[in-house]
Amino acid sequence: MSPAADTLSTRRPGVALFAVLVAVLLLALLAIGSMTLGRGDFLRSRDERVMRSAANAADAGAYDLLRRWPSASYASMPVGATIGPDTLVRTGASAVSRTTRASRALYWTVSVGSSGDSLAHTLSRRAVQVAYRLALPDLLIDAALIARDSVSVIDSARVVGTDTAIAGWGASCATPSSTAAITMADTSRLCDGGCGVGSVSGRIVGAPALRADSSAANSARYRVFGSETWATLTRHAGLVIPAGSVVTPAPVVVGATCDRTRADNWGAPGAATSCATYAPLIWARGDLEMRGGVGQGVLLVDGDFTLSAGALFAGVVITRDDLRTLGVGGTVLGAVLAGDASVASGDHTTLGGMSRLQRSHCAVEQALEWSARLVPVRQRAWAALRD
């Protein structure tokens, strides 16, 4: 064998070993690269999941106010006041929210959601804000009683347009002013005691005692209230009363908390209890008699509303048909709208006994605010905040 051939044969194992080492190195580099890419994908996926969890928690914290709204006295908080901080805990995340009343009808909620672990360097925080408004019905109330058809005021009953307020409402009430006692489309359809045509005796007091307004004959005035209607209000009623019910509502306080789950709790007008600011939206699905007791809020009655046994209601009463009294009758402080759905001889609003209807701007305004549902502002209700 020649020397050249012998040299070539001795070098081949070294070349093969080098090739193997290069191959192993390449495989190791590929493995390391795959592991690095996999770890990067895992970290990105984890971080995205944590960020989504924080964002979802922030959203849930912001909208949780809608769930809590009916069971608390948020609507009675003064402008500029803040609710919270309120904490909402979810699986793997939490949110802290604060709500500020910006005006009579506007609220702003800021919610900060957190997810992950600061020790593991995975903590994520997201903040959002949501604008809410009170869905306030726009009522044209220019008298203590607005009636679509006839009205009879007899016995010792009185309808008074002079503004009044319960002492317990204090500074929350505006300066009293006087309005008409009764607004009707045709004032000749009033029977006051002697039932002379359009007669007015001492039972009806206001400035003026009677106001003629053709819009009082329009049935829409008793069903459409600006952006709200009878249908939207009844759909979100806090209390629903069966047709033909006879009720004697009374405030219910458990410990120091007003029990808003009770159908017979309609709040406590002017009282020094936690039910003083509870004024529910009540829907009676037919005729309703309030036989004694006290209550406040907005009362919607699908038929006739009857007052008896000295019942007291503060706020707004809207009946699809008539307001009636039995025996000594009762009192309404605020305003009554009687829609007179059934117009027939002898079928009209009748006040007798010692009944009293008196205009109260304060009762109307507070009842509308305290009973209103909360809804997100339609345009730009939600916005993300930089954290």
Image (cartoon, helix red, strand yellow):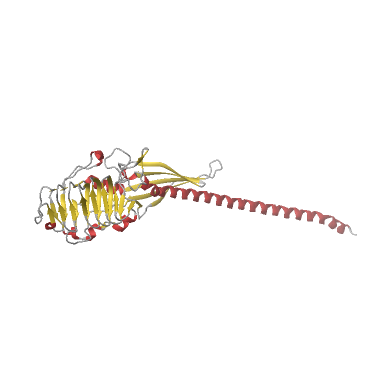
Give how far across and how far down residue 314 sits, in percent.
25, 46
The quarter holding residue 227 reads bottom left
Q: Is 123 situated left or right of 62 in this image? A: right
Camera-side residue: 142 or 259? 259
The answer to whether residue 57 of the structure is visible from this angle is yes
Give how far across and how far down residue 193 sits, in percent.
11, 51
The quarter holding residue 320 reads bottom left
Camera-side residue: 256 or 119? 256
Give how far across and how far down residue 20 sits, in percent.
76, 55
Q: Is 179 situated left or right of 37 in this image? A: left
The answer to whether residue 142 of the structure is visible from this angle is no
Q: Which residue is drawn at 57% across and 49% down?
A: 43
- The number of discs equals 0
Give how far across and how far down residue 190 sits, in percent.
13, 55
Q: Quadrant of the N terminus?
A: bottom right
Q: Is 146 situated left or right of 21 in this image? A: left
Q: Residue at x 54, y 49 (%)?
A: 47
